[in-house]
Image: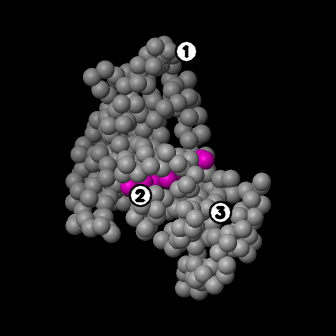
C-alpha cells in the first residue's frame, strides 16, 4: 500500500473542503465543465437569459504545459472552445496548435487531481502544480496542508497510474440510455436544463454544472444551491416521467426524443414532449384524455425499463 490510511483520510477531508469551495467539479461530466474550469458571465443578465462560458484550466494555457513545461496564463482575447469549454492561450500559434489536436493538450483525468483519482476521488487541482507524463499533463492538488504531486511522486508509479486509470475508466463509462432513460453517454439529463425550474419558475431554465446532482445514475444540473437542496429533499418529484422520453410517444408505445423546453406539469409531475417542424406532441396530447394517456404512457414505460 503506497499511502498510509491516515494520510488518505487527511487528504480526502482536506480535498473535499477544497472541492466544495471551488465549485465547478461538482459535475461528474468532465467535458461539460472539467475540474479547474470556472463559469464566467458576459453581457447583461436578465431573468430569461444568462450569457456564460466555462473557462478551462482556470485560464492557463493547455499548450504551455506541454511545449514550455510551465503554467502560463492565457489571454481571453486568444481563446478556443472545445466540447463546451473555453481555453485561453498565450498567442495565436498556440491556439492554432491546440485546434489541430485538442486531445493532446487536454489534461489527464478530465483535469482532476491525478493523485486524487488514484485514491478513487475527484480533487480540484492547483493548475500550477503539474507534471507531464508520457506527453500528457497531469494536475495536482496543492494547499498549505497537502502536496498531492509529492504524494504521487513518492508512490510506486506503475501502481498509482494503474489505480488512477481504473478509477477514471469507471467514471467515464457510457450512461447512454441508462435504465431505458432518455440520457446521452454523458449521463446529463434534460440537455442540462434544471428539473426544478419547471416547477418553481414555470419554465425551462439551463442549469449550471457546478450545481450538479445525481439520482438513479443520472446527472441533473440545477441553477443554484437552493435548487440543489430542493431536489435532494424529493428527487422523485423532479425526475421527468417516462424516463425523460416524450410522454405522447410513450402513450402510443414508442420512444420519441424531446424538446426540453416543451413540457407540462400534470399532477405535480414533469412530462416532456417532442417538438419539431413536423410534430408538436404537446398539442397531440391535449387532443386526448390526459388521464388515459398517462396510464398508457406509464404502462409502456414499465416495459421499456424492463419492469
Can you give x and y, in whole percent of width and height, for residue 248 in the image? 65, 74
Task: From this view, report whether residue 305 is shown above or below residue 260.
Answer: above
For the point 59% across and 86% down, which residue is it? Answer: 278
Can residue 163 be seen by looking at this rendering? yes
- Of residues 264 and 112, the one nearer the viewer is 264
> Of helix, strand and loop, which one carries label 3?
helix
Locate residue 39 relative to residue 6 in the image: left or right. left
Q: Confirm whether the magenta stretch covers residue 222.
A: yes
Can you give x and y, in whole percent of width and height, for residue 301 in the image? 72, 62
N-term-proximal mark, 3 vs 1:
1
Can residue 30 be seen by looking at this rendering? no
Return the residue at label 3.
242
Cβ atoms at labels 3 and 1 below 8 Å apart: no
N-term-proximal mark, 3 vs 2:
2
> Of helix, strand and loop, which one carries label 1?
loop
Name the disc covering residue 207, or none. 2
Q: Where is the N terminus found, in terms of image quarters?
A: top right
Cβ atoms at labels 3 and 2 below 8 Å apart: no
- Of residues 209 and 216, the one nearer the viewer is 216
Region in magenta:
216-223
N-term-proximal mark, 1 vs 2:
1
Q: How far apart are marks 1 and 2 (CA)?
A: 41 Å
For the point 38% across and 29% down, which residue is it? Answer: 15
Return the residue at label 1.
1
For discs 3 and 1, the disc positioned in front in the rendered view: 3
For the point 43% across and 45% down, which residue is it? Answer: 229
Can you give x and y, in whole percent of width and height, for residue 125 in the image? 36, 35
Amino acid at each position: 500500500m503506497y499511502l498510509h490510511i491516515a494520510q488518505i483520510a487527511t487528504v480526502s477531508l482536506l480535498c473535499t473542503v477544497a472541492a466544495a469551495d471551488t465549485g465547478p467539479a461538482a459535475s461528474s461530466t468532465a467535458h461539460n465543465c472539467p475540474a479547474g474550469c470556472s463559469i464566467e458571465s458576459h453581457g447583461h443578465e436578465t431573468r430569461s437569459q444568462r450569457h456564460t462560458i466555462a473557462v478551462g484550466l482556470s485560464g492557463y494555457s493547455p499548450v504551455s504545459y506541454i511545449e514550455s513545461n510551465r503554467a502560463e496564463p492565457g489571454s481571453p482575447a486568444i481563446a478556443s472552445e472545445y466540447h463546451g469549454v473555453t481555453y485561453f492561450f498565450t498567442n495565436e500559434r498556440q491556439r492554432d496548435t491546440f485546434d489541430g489536436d485538442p486531445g493532446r493538450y487536454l489534461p489527464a483525468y478530465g483535469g482532476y487531481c491525478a493523485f486524487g483519482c488514484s485514491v478513487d476521488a475527484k480533487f480540484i487541482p492547483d493548475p500550477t502544480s503539474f507534471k507531464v507524463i508520457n506527453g500528457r499533463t497531469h494536475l495536482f492538488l496543492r494547499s498549505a496542508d497537502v502536496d498531492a504531486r509529492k504524494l504521487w511522486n513518492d508512490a510506486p508509479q506503475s501502481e498509482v497510474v494503474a489505480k488512477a486509470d481504473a478509477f477514471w475508466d469507471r467514471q467515464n463509462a457510457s450512461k447512454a440510455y441508462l435504465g431505458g432513460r432518455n440520457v446521452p453517454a454523458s449521463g446529463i439529463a434534460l440537455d442540462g436544463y434544471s428539473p426544478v425550474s419547471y416547477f418553481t419558475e414555470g419554465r425551462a431554465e439551463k442549469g449550471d454544472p457546478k450545481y450538479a446532482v445525481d439520482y438513479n445514475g443520472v446527472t441533473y444540473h440545477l441553477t443554484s444551491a437552493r435548487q440543489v437542496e430542493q431536489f435532494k429533499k424529493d428527487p422523485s418529484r423532479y425526475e421527468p416521467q417516462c424516463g425523460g422520453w416524450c410522454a405522447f410517444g410513450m402513450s402510443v408505445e414508442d420512444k420519441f426524443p424531446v424538446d426540453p423546453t416543451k413540457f407540462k406539469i400534470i399532477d405535480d409531475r414533469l412530462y416532456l414532449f417532442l417538438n419539431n417542424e413536423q410534430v408538436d406532441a404537446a398539442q397531440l396530447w391535449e387532443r386526448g384524455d390526459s388521464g388515459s394517456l398517462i396510464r398508457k404512457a406509464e404502462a409502456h414505460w414499465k416495459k421499456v425499463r424492463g419492469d
